[in-house]
Image (cartoon, rainbow, N blue to C red):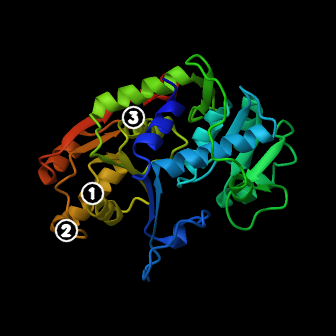
Amino acid sequence: MIITEILARNAETYGQETCLTEINLDLQESHNVTWREYELIENNPAGEYRREMTWRVFDEKANRMANLLLKRGIKKGDKVAILLMNCLEWLPIYFGILKAGAIAVPLNFRYTAEEIKYCLDLSETIVLIFGPEFIGRVETIYDQISKVKTIFFSGENRPSFAENYDRLTANCSSEAPKIQLTDKDDAAVYFSSGTTGFPKAILHTHQGLMSACYTENKHHSQNREDNFLCIPPLYHTGAKMHWFGSLLSGSKAVLLRGMKPEWILKTVSEEKITIVWLLVPWAQDILDAIERGDVRLEDYDLAQWRLMHIGAQPVPPSLIRRWKKFFPDHLYDTNYGLSESIGPG
């Protein structure tokens, strides 16, 4: 089965159920809200917002993206780059690229303009979609990326050199395009971290993406009752492939923009989160906040939180001993993976 078929199956089976929620507890640190069918939380002087999307809307948004690309002459195997912060738009755009038979090229949101240009050139990308946070960086290179024929912008205050992605997709069909895909077809290009030089391009097939789905789902035993809290960036294999377990099980996930200890605990409590993937600094911050008395666990409903997993760097045993002191009932594991091996395992 191709990964886009999993999305279509979920839309058919669980269409009216929420699949993704985006939460930002400080609008001053957020990007602009771009999908007008989602509203800010009412009566919220703190500036919090929360957006939801159902499986059916997810699939329809992906289809609209695919049909836009096909209308623009994108062919099977063409590269389409994504340069966005974590948001509800991210995954439908990614799946829309796949549905069009194109190859998704997620870009690190920390890249400089020079690194963005390097990755676009190396991957031979011909379409770029980017968000408001990257206007300045893209503006400095847009006339130098000669292989990129189309630039889409998602958000407010569209720059003159880009087209309005949100308006254009709204006028495209929400029906699935008739593109035949196989397990062996190329699906995505990911980039290494570039710690020893410029990032290296890594090509994955649809079979590889499905392998990540099965590995993640087996590893963490996700089921329909789970709700996965995703904080790390979706451009990386780690966060996205962890979410692939939720895709396979048809379960919920929450994208939290921000990583303050009180924000994480508040989200776990109010959204009934069952699985959280933390990086070492975030876990340490939570423990430090508890020990200082900055947060009190009794103020939150955390009984349903069953699994904390951690990785992407060495994990001090002392951290886990501290964690089990405050969360003795948590299942725990350390994740290790490489972008070359399709992420965590």
For mark 2, does the 10 Å Cα neighbourhood hold few (<14), some (14 to 19), or many (20 or more) residues? few
**Residue 272 marker:** 1
Dot 3 crowding, Cα within 10 Å, few <14, some 14–19, many 20+ = many
Q: Quadrant location of the C terminus?
A: top left
The disc label shown at residue 145, or none: none
Comes first in the chain, label 1 or label 3:
3
The residue located at (81%, 41%) in the rendering is 72
* Side (left or right) of 181 relative to 273: right
Query: Residue at left 61%, top 27%?
Result: 187
Q: Name the residue under label 2.
A: 296
SS at badge 1: loop
Q: In this figure, which residue is indicated by the disc labeled 3?
A: 248
Secondary structure under tag 2 reads: loop
Q: Which of marks 1 and 3 is in front?
A: 3
**Disc 1 residue type (three-letter):** Lys
Place of residue 104 in the rendered image (x, y in percent of width and height, measured from the top left): 64, 35
* Residue 150 shows in the view: yes
Residue 108 is left or right of residue 210, and the answer is right
Could you tell me the amino acid type at mark 2? Arg
